[in-house]
Structures are given as structure tokens and as C-alpha cells.
């Protein structure tokens, strides 16, 4: 790799002490005839999900009059990462800009090179910052993931992202309100699980916790709760329950590691200038509560390990019933996240659609909580908490929408393009010590009872015949 110029930045060492990462960056520079350097005072920030993120300078051949250097986000995903930055069609920011105006230019980063797989299983990605990232600082600019922020900085960035995603990316006329569509509960949940990459994993994930995906109910903490996965089965009485929802643009993988906030050298953050990375899962026709549920749950999960039993229960209650207000047992930062998500969402939907928005948000929360049970780095404690959340949210949904409502003549069609079908892949075998047998089916029990009765009858006839013949 060529040496950096004096005004571009510093060599990778000592700013990138990881030898595997440094070698990959140097190899990339040599193969592509580009220089990679780092601004002075660069630090490698390790986020909540285990990824590493820093800003680098990329210098490449350029025609006269064009700036040869630009800043890039260098993101390193950990091996066995739960993040899904690279999958599906690459979303073009140019296409997004033409479609949604200023939002893409201001907030959507773009993957500018194919990802590089490191020999230790990690993945290296290069993404171009949005135009606003260059302000207000230059060489001393730093970037933080939302999951690295705390206190007021976290709450301000959390609100800024949700407001921009809804009010800017999915802007609608004030008098019209967001368009409403209708589907049914089973297809809605299935589409969200598929979009999150959890559809082929969810049955296996439930079996790890000792539950059968086809069971009607789950016994969690000695309390029977409805199985939140059961409605995806067409045989479920709730499969065809109507669900009204608002649709539009969604990032599709919105968690704190994919929200980058520029910070000045003085530590001040600029949440209104955030950038979203990992945009390969962008969907132009998604339920609008997908991103809200994903970012909310990913952020509150940071706090779950530190909550007491009462606080944990209060958080589930607040997530399921945000309209009831903050429970007294819930700490301030966690409660504020739930309140902000509900406030921003219902303000976007408008007074006439508040109830529709909250029902849709709850169903999206069920799907996102189920998705989180498939993340290996959340098991067992936070994964089981997410399963409890999904089951409790499903209980509330079914209580408010009983089977009689579900039996109405609603079309059993999937949302958008997703088909309704069971997983094709067979889940990996789970060690017997970690599973709980679902038990014999009623039909098997009946067959065993009939066989036992027949054997008893034969034995009785044999005794009778023996007595009648006088055999001693």
C-alpha cells in the first residue's frame, strides 16, 4: 500500500493494532491501487453487537479538478454476527435519492465496495458517509454507533432516527395520513420473520428453550401463554385474523450498530446528522412499524441484564401496553425509549389511526421479539426474555381481538410478495438434554389404550376358557 500523504492522515499502525484487520486493509489498498489512512486521533469503537467501526481516508486516482480523497466508514462485523448488513439486492442510494428525495442524501450511507471476508470469520465493509457527515468537524470528526451513546445523547439520537424514518422518508400529506392496507395475522408474522432472516431458524430456536413451535401454548415461569409462532400455521384459528397496517419505506435492519452519529472533538454529538448503514435490506413496501420495533427492542435489550425481576416485568408491560403510561418500577432511560417510540409513531399515524398504529406496532414487536430468540449472542437470558415478551404481546393481541373477530371473511393472502409456506430446511438436531419432549399426540394415546384393552380382553377370555374346561 502506498504511504499516506501528509495532509491525508496517518499510517494504519498504531491506530489499527489488530494485525488481521490491518493486513486486510493493506491488501485491499495494494490490489485496488488505493491508499487507506486514518485521521489523527482515530479510535476504533467496538459497539454493543461486537462490531468495530472507525473513519478512514480513501485516496484513489482522480481526474484533474476532482478531490482524490474521501472519508469512508470502515466497519468490521464479528464472526457469527447477528447483523445482516450483506444480503439480498444491494440498495442503490442513487435510486433511493430519486425515489425519496433528500432523505437518502442526508441519511443513507452507501456500500461502495464488495465486502471482504477475513480469515478469522469476520467481515470487512466500506461505506460512504452521507454528505452531512462532513460537518461540523473535519480531521477530528469521530463517529459513534447509537448503541454506544448513553443518557440524553442516546435519547436524542433515538428520537431523531425514528422521526426522520417516518416523517421524512415516509412523508405524507397532513390531511391524507399514511395509507392503510389489510392482511391477516399469520402472513404478517411470516413476512416479518422472513424479512429479518429468522424464518428458517425460529423453530430450532424455540426448541433450544424447550418448546415445540407447533404447540398452542407455552408454559413460561409456570404461566401458560399463547405460542406467538402458532398463528403462522394455516390451521391456527388466528391465522386469518385481519390486521390493518401502514406500509412504506423501511431500513429492514435497524439496530444501534447501523445508526452512526457524528461527534465533534469536544464530544458533542450531532444526532440530526445521523447516517444509516447496512442498507441492503431496505424495503419500499414494508410495514412501517418494522423499523420502530427493531430499533426499540435492540436498544432496550442493552438494559435488560441490569433490571430486577420487577423492573423486567414492568418493561414487558410497558412495551405491550404503552398507552397505559410508564410503570413506576421502570428506570428512566428505558421508560423514555418506550415512550418516545410510541409518541413518534402515534404522532405520525395521526389521532384517527392511533389504535391501528398501536395494534400494528404490537404485532411487529411480536415478530421482532421472536427474531431475537434466534440470535446466539442473546441466549439464554435475553433470548428467553424476548420469548416471554412475544408471548405476552400475543396474549394481549388475542385478548383484544378474539377468535370471533378472526373468523370474518378476510383474504388469506400474504403481505406483499411473501408466500405462505412452512420452512423448507430441517432444523439442526438439538441435544436431548436441552429439549423437552412435546409428548404423544391424542391419536397415539388412543391407539395405545385400544391395544391395552384388546390384550386385557384376550387375557380374560383365556382365563374363562381355562375355567370352563376344568384345567387346574
Image (cartoon, rainbow, N blue to C red):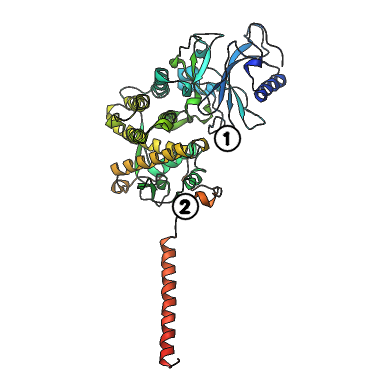
Answer with left or right where residue 401 lies relative to residue 168.
Answer: left
Residue at 48% in and 12% down: 267
Q: Which mark is residue 189?
A: none
Residue 247 appears anywhere in the view: no
- Residue to which mark 1 is pinned: 80
Judging depth in this view, the residue of 358 and 101 nearest the camera is: 358
Between 422 and 448, the one nearer to me in the picture: 448
Name the image quarter holding the N terminus: top right
Q: To which quarter of the image does residue 173 belong?
A: top left
Q: Is residue 378 visible?
A: yes
In the picture, measured across the screen, residue 127 lies left or right of residue 446, that is: right
What secondary structure is found at the residue carrying circle 2? loop
Q: Which residue is pictured at 43% across the width and 37% down the height?
A: 369
| Image coordinates for residue 301, horizontal then vertical, percent | 43, 31
User: Does label 1 or label 2 sit earlier along the sequence?
Assistant: 1
**Which quadrant of the figure contains the C terminus?**
bottom left
Residue sitting at 33 percent across and 43 percent down? 395
Horizontal and vertical percent for residue 57? 61, 14
Please provide percent x and percent y for residue 358.
33, 33
Mark 2 surroundings within 10 Å by alpha-carbon count, few (fewer than 14), some (14 through 19), many (20 or more): few
Mark 1 vs mark 2: in front: 2
Extreme-bottom residue of the structure: 470
Circle 1 crowding by C-alpha within 10 Å: few under 14, some 14–19, many from 20:
few
Label at residue 436: 2
Amino acid at each position: 500500500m502506498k504511504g499516506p500523504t501528509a495532509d491525508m492522515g496517518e499510517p494504519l499502525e498504531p491506530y489499527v493494532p489488530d494485525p488481521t484487520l490491518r493486513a486486510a486493509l493493506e491488501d485491499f489498498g495494494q490490489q485496488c491501487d488505493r491508499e487507506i489512512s486514518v485521521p489523527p486521533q482515530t479510535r476504533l469503537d467496538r459497539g454493543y453487537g461486537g462490531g468495530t467501526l472507525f473513519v478512514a481516508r480513501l485516496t484513489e486516482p482522480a481526474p484533474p479538478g476532482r478531490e482524490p480523497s474521501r472519508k469512508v466508514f470502515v466497519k468490521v462485523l464479528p464472526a457469527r454476527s447477528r447483523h445482516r448488513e450483506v444480503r439480498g439486492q444491494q440498495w442503490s442510494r442513487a435510486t433511493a435519492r430519486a425515489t425519496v428525495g433528500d432523505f437518502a442524501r442526508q441519511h443513507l450511507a452507501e456500500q461502495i465496495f464488495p465486502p471482504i471476508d477475513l480469515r478469522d470469520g469476520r467481515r470487512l465493509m466500506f461505506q460512504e458517509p452521507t454528505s452531512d457527515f462532513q460537518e461540523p468537524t473535519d480531521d477530528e470528526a469521530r463517529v459513534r454507533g447509537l448503541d454506544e451513546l448513553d443518557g440524553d445523547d442516546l435519547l436524542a439520537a433515538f428520537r431523531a432516527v425514528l422521526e426522520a424514518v417516518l416523517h421524512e422518508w415516509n412523508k405524507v400529506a397532513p390531511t391524507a395520513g399514511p395509507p392503510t392496507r389489510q392482511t391477516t395475522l399469520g402472513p404478517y408474522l411470516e413476512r416479518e420473520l422472513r424479512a429479518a432472516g429468522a424464518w428458517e431458524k425460529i423453530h430450532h430456536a424455540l426448541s433450544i428453550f424447550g418448546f415445540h413451535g407447533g404447540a398452542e401454548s407455552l408454559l413460561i415461569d409456570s404461566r401458560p401463554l399463547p405460542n406467538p409462532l402458532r398463528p403462522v400455521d394455516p390451521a391456527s384459528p388466528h391465522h386469518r385474523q385481519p390486521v390493518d397496517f401502514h406500509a412504506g419505506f423501511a431500513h429492514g435492519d435497524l439496530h444501534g450498530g447501523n445508526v452512526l452519529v457524528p461527534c465533534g472533538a469536544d464530544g458533542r454529538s450531532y444526532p440530526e446528522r445521523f447516517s444509516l448503514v447496512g442498507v441492503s435490506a431496505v424495503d419500499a413496501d414494508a410495514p412501517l412499524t418494522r423499523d420502530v420495533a427493531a430499533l426499540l427492542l435492540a436498544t432496550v435489550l442493552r438494559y435488560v441484564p441490569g433490571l430486577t425481576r420487577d423492573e423486567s416485568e414492568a418493561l414487558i408491560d410497558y412495551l405491550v401496553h404503552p398507552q397505559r403510561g410508564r410503570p413506576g418500577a421502570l428506570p428512566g432511560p428505558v421508560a423514555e425509549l418506550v415512550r418516545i417510540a410510541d409518541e413518534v409513531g402515534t404522532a405520525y399515524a395521526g389521532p384517527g389511526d392511533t389504535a391501528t398504529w398501536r395494534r400494528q406496532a404490537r404485532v411487529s414487536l411480536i415478530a421482532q421479539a421472536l427474531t431475537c430468540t434466534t440470535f446466539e449472542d442473546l441466549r439464554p437470558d435475553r433470548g428467553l426474555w424476548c420469548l416471554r415478551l412475544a408471548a405476552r404481546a400475543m396474549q394481549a393481541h388475542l385478548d383484544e381481538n378474539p377468535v370471533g373477530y378472526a373468523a370474518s371473511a378476510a383474504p388469506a393472502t400474504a403481505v406483499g410478495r411473501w408466500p405462505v409456506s412452512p420452512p423448507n430446511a430441517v432444523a439442526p438436531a438439538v441435544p436431548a438434554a436441552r429439549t423437552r419432549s412435546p409428548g404423544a399426540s391424542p391419536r397415539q394415546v388412543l391407539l395405545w389404550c385400544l391395544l391395552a384393552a384388546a390384550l386385557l380382553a384376550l387375557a380374560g377370555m383365556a382365563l374363562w376358557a381355562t375355567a370352563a374346561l376344568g384345567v387346574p
